[in-house]
Amino acid sequence: MRLRFLDPACAIVPGGGGVPLTDIALTSAALADLNPPVEHVVMTENETNFLAFPAAPKSLVLFGAGYGIGALAGVSWLRARDVHYWGDIDTHGFAILDQLRAYAPHARSFLMNRARCWRIASTGRRKRRR
């Protein structure tokens, strides 16, 4: 599982020159043992969203790589954090959200609501860039 600390003050993995690492990849077991000093956790299905996520106090973002979210099964510290999920507005995005809620029942989605879905659907397919 890959994670980025959105608040460098919360990064707990030391890097070279005393600068903490803010973007790291961990095994499921290492993530379960981490217990970072954050209040907010955002899960995202897409790497672009993961990389573009802005700085935020006491927060981190996890890149689930789609169904890789199953790696969170043993991450008990999620239950004590504010958890959000941002995935695609398709059947897979909602299935992944459902899977996340098995580990963090209080998880809330954002940018995945009915109004946004209908707004996208009513405009038709997005045009591809050339």
Image (tube, rainbow, N blue to C red):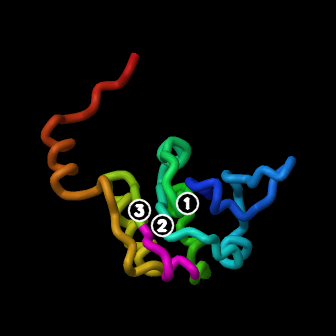
Q: Residue at x 78, y 50 (%)?
A: 19
Q: Tag 3: residue type?
A: Tyr
According to the picture, the residue beneath numbered tag 3 turns out to be 85
Question: Is 80 above or below relative to 30?
Answer: below
Label 2 Cα crowd, 10 Å radius (few <14 / some 14-19 / many 20+): some
According to the picture, the residue beneath numbered tag 2 turns out to be 40
User: Percent x, y for residue 64?
Assistant: 54, 60
10 magenta-colored: no
Can residue 1 be seen here? The reply is: no
Could you tell which of marks 1 and 2 lies nearer the N-terminus? 2
Q: Residue at x 73, y 53 (%)?
A: 21
Looking at the rendered structure, the number of numbered marks drawn on it comes to 3
Q: Residue at x 44, y 70 (%)?
A: 83
Question: Is 64 above or below relative to 101?
Answer: above
Separation of residues labelled 2 and 3 (CA atoms): 11 Å
> Element under label 3?
strand
Front in this rendered view, residue 57 or 31: 57
Could you tell which of marks 2 and 3 lies nearer the N-terminus? 2
According to the picture, the residue beneath numbered tag 1 turns out to be 60
Location of residue 85 (image quadrant) = bottom left
Q: Residue at x 41, y 76 (%)?
A: 101
Q: Quadrant of the N terminus?
A: bottom right
Location of residue 119 (image quadrant) = top left
Q: Nearer the viewer, mark 2 or mark 3?
A: 2
Relative placement, left or right, of 94 versus 48 is left
Relative placement, left or right, of 14 versus 130 is right
Magenta residues, as a range? 77-83
> Element under label 1?
strand
Question: Is 32 above or below relative to 121?
Answer: below
Separation of residues labelled 1 and 2 (CA atoms): 7 Å
Q: Tag 1: residue type?
A: Leu
Q: Tag 2: residue type?
A: His
